[in-house]
Image (spheres, coloured by chain):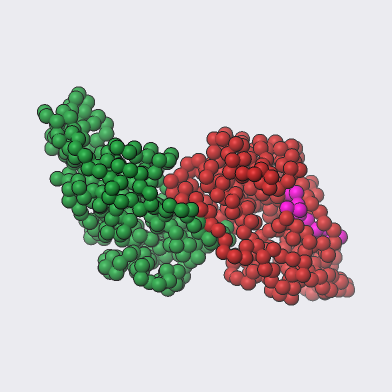
Chain colours: A green, B red
Amino acid sequence: MPALPSREVRLAARPVGLPKPSDFAVAEAAAPEPQAGQVQVKNLWMSVDPYMRGRMYDRPSYVPPFQIGEALQGHALGQVVASGDPGFAPGDLVLHMFGWREAVTHVAAAFQKFDPRGLPPEAFLGVVGMPGLTAYAGLLQIGQPQPGETVFVSGGAGAVGSIVAQIAKLKGCTVVASAGSDEKCRWLESLGIDKAVNYKTCGNLLEAVRAAAPKGIDVYFDNVGGEHLEVALELARPFARFVECGMISQYNETGVPVGPRNLIYVVGKSLKIQGFIVSQFAGLKDQFEADMAEWIKAGKLKWEETVKHGIEEAAPAFLGLFSGANAGKMLVKLA
Amino acid sequence: MPALPSREVRLAARPVGLPKPSDFAVAEAAAPEPQAGQVQVKNLWMSVDPYMRGRMYDRPSYVPPFQIGEALQGHALGQVVASGDPGFAPGDLVLHMFGWREAVTHVAAAFQKFDPRGLPPEAFLGVVGMPGLTAYAGLLQIGQPQPGETVFVSGGAGAVGSIVAQIAKLKGCTVVASAGSDEKCRWLESLGIDKAVNYKTCGNLLEAVRAAAPKGIDVYFDNVGGEHLEVALELARPFARFVECGMISQYNETGVPVGPRNLIYVVGKSLKIQGFIVSQFAGLKDQFEADMAEWIKAGKLKWEETVKHGIEEAAPAFLGLFSGANAGKMLVKLA
């Protein structure tokens, strides 16, 4: 078995503020012939996700920082080309964390075979993968939406937000979402979301969301932070739950960020504001996949993907997350 | 039974920023002879508490705002003088919400007889009253401290904070507290608190607390907000719980408050930041009183009171809460 040629995306420089193309470099590499206990994989799809921005800072966090000159990492879907491990055979589809490259050879334990449950395999990078589990577990475990309650989700047209919004509808809630274009808003409303607010053009986000949620907000699923979080604090009903999934508006902040000026409501309204990392809900994976497959097959849950093609498009796809270039999950098709 | 003469403290003007003496006025009133179903009570003690500042704003909240020209309200301890209700007899000690006055006549349901459990009755305005339950329920129900964990409590020498700090020690935690004078810090350390930091003189609060809690913070009990909250966010360990009891540093804010600039840690560290109102834990009252009485009798829990005398001192006592004039519970002895 020969080595597989592979191109990979390396971190060329630590981004300052909004990442730019020159912070990334495509380099030639190779996935060597697998030794005993190793598997050689050709990647078919890779994922770009907002959380990866955090790994580009040189600071301790829940995952170690990316290193300059080294290939980035992230979820990917590949196909086994050659295997030195009895658990894998050529042709097997596998999920793994060696995205941002065309091929990889690594120990077998780094790769995970999976049951596609009748779905396109790349859906396991999105709606039934990490972003979907993030939506499902964050909303249901932390948000605990009850029928008749109002759920507000920011970044509602994103990979996570669009799933949150639909699961909240399935749970009997009134759902208000924010998104960054009229087209995204129309898409969300076509999915049955009660009201989608274009935060870029609505003028006054607080009044727009207040009009859409006149009884106030019981659950806020936060992907954005910043002004969205202040609006949610203002409109929160007593005992509201804030699911703190992400704050994409803050990820590229270079100055001192502005904290939510009305956070004091957390006391008077008895709010719960809780962050999480999806890995803490890994135990829900089977239930999540089963529920999602059922909802998808019944036509109750839909998803979008925005697909870029080729490893050269990986960095631009990632950059596009911060300008809202994606509707639903942003993916890069590698082969 | 004649009417009882009574002086009462009325809200003369809505405070702007830090309340001042002229925002309050002592006026003559009377507690009339009780009708059938009413009770006439002479007040012995009244409580002043930081949360009352919130009721001086004209805005909706979990309790209605005080009205200008009307007597303020708050927890008080009184003795029945005359009763038109078979459930009460002259001499009975009662707890009620008609503080800020020397006497009151009201329907019997507004008064609550209680078992002093061998403690001084005025303790039921503090250590075994609302502030004590606030400490007990907030720390144990929301903070859920585990043996060996580190608890940081701001306003550690106050009516709530000093009880939080001691219960956390009883639960096997390392406890760091902040307070506003060296004397208060010495008192806290004499109670067994591991380290008390004088936030007014320590120079750099973050570094002072970091030195006192080198492993980081697992539970933060917040009475102060502002810089204290930012310090706690910075030092929080993953999955830390923030008990949001109050933010006294913000109560007199006249401009736009500054939110915690590092709130984004709530995501990456999977923090839970939860506010509460003590009334939601009313169901714990019996267990709380029993636990506290046991700890007090065993010498494991101590408390301080700062006592002012006479209704004329009620407003100054309240104002003193914002300059740290109290160690432990601030009370006004009325008779």
Q: Quadrant of the C terminus of chain A?
A: top left
Magenta residue check for B333: yes
For image coordinates 58% across by 39% down, the residue present is B210
Q: Of B137 and A73, which appears nearest the observer?
A: A73
Query: In the image, A174: left or right of A329?
Result: right
Q: Residue at x 56, y 64 (%)?
A: B256
Residue extending farthest to the left is A1
Give the image location of residue A192, x and y in percent: 30, 67
Q: Image quarter for residue B45?
A: bottom right
| Nearer to us in this view, B174 or A22 | A22
Tally of numbered discs: 0
Q: Is residue B20 above or below residue B221?
A: below
Measured as percent of width and height from the top left, residue A210 is found at 44, 71
Pick out the residue farthest to the right: B2
Q: B153 and A226: which one is in front?
A: A226
Q: Quadrant of the N terminus of chain A?
A: top left
Q: What's the residue at 50%, 56% (across, down)? A: A259
Residue A158 place in picture, x, y as percent: 31, 57
Residue A177 is inside the magenta segment: no
Is residue A114 among what the camera can see? no
Residue B299 x %, y %: 75, 37
**Residue drawn at the location 71% of the way across and 57% of the way down:** B322
Q: In this rendering, is residue A149 above or below A247?
A: below
State the residue in front, A109 or B279.
A109
Q: Give the extent of the magenta segment.
A: B324-335
Q: Is residue A230 visible?
A: yes
